């Protein structure tokens, strides 16, 4: 599965996943925000690496009601996505990975 597919599946299940990489910060450059209006849930955390952000997303989504059987499938492009955005971050860019509003 691709990271974009993972984010889209989460949103189709009713959870919004938002990842931001802030190249201006020296540490904790990745911010992850997860929200679900249906479950009255919101979680925010700053971490150093994209794989840490993905672990947080998986762990937090698994606590929510719903079918998360796909949640721990491998993300095939995780290293490539992280490298791409880290490179932009070193150039001082702020990058956001987001998808459409979840279906209601």
Image (cartoon, grey):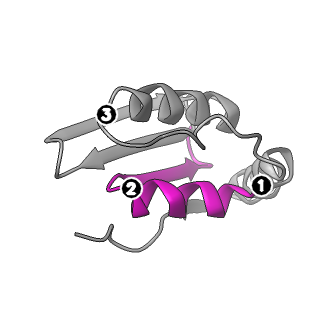
Q: In the rendered view of the protein, which quadrant contains the C terminus?
A: bottom left
Residue 51 in the image: above or below residue 87: above
Tag shown at residue 51: none
- In depth, the one of 63 and 98 nearer the eye is 63
Q: Residue at x 39, y 55 (%)?
A: 13
Nearer to us of marks 1 and 3 is: 3
Of discs 2 and 1, which sits in the foreground? 2
Residue 42's x, y, as percent? Answer: 24, 39
Boundaries of the magenta span: 1-26
Residue at mark 3 to residue at mark 2: CA–CA distance: 10 Å
Quadrant of residue 95 within the rendered picture = bottom right
Instruction: Kindly identify which residue carries mark 2.
Output: 13
Q: Residue at x 84, y 49 (%)?
A: 76
Picture quarter with the N terminus: bottom right
Q: Secondary structure at mark 1?
A: helix
Q: CA distance from mark 2 to mark 1?
A: 23 Å
Q: Are marks 3 and 2 in contact (CB under 8 Å)?
A: no
Residue 80: percent from left, percent from top: 86, 53
Is residue 25 left or right of 73 when viewed as pictured? left
Residue that badge 3 annotates: 64
Q: Secondary structure at mark 2?
A: loop
64 in magenta = no
Viewer-side residue, 17 vs 63: 63
Crowdedness of circle 1 by 10 Å Cα count: few (<14), some, many (20+)?
some
List the residue tagged with mark 1: 81
Between the residue at mark 1 and the residue at mark 3, the CA separation in whole angstroms equals 26 Å
Q: Mark 1 or mark 2, which is nearer the start of the sequence?
A: 2
């Amino acid at each position: 599965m691709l990271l974009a597919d993972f984010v889209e599946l989460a949103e189709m299940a009713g959870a919004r996943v938002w990842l931001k990489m802030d190249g201006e910060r020296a540490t904790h450059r990745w911010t992850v925000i997860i929200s679900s209006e249906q479950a009255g849930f919101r979680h925010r955390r700053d971490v150093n690496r994209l794989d840490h952000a993905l672990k947080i997303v998986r762990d937090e989504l698994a606590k929510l009601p719903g079918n998360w059987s796909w949640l721990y499938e491998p993300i095939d492009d995780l290293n490539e996505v992280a490298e791409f955005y880290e490179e932009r971050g070193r150039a001082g860019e702020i990058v956001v990975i987001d998808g459409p509003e979840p279906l209601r």
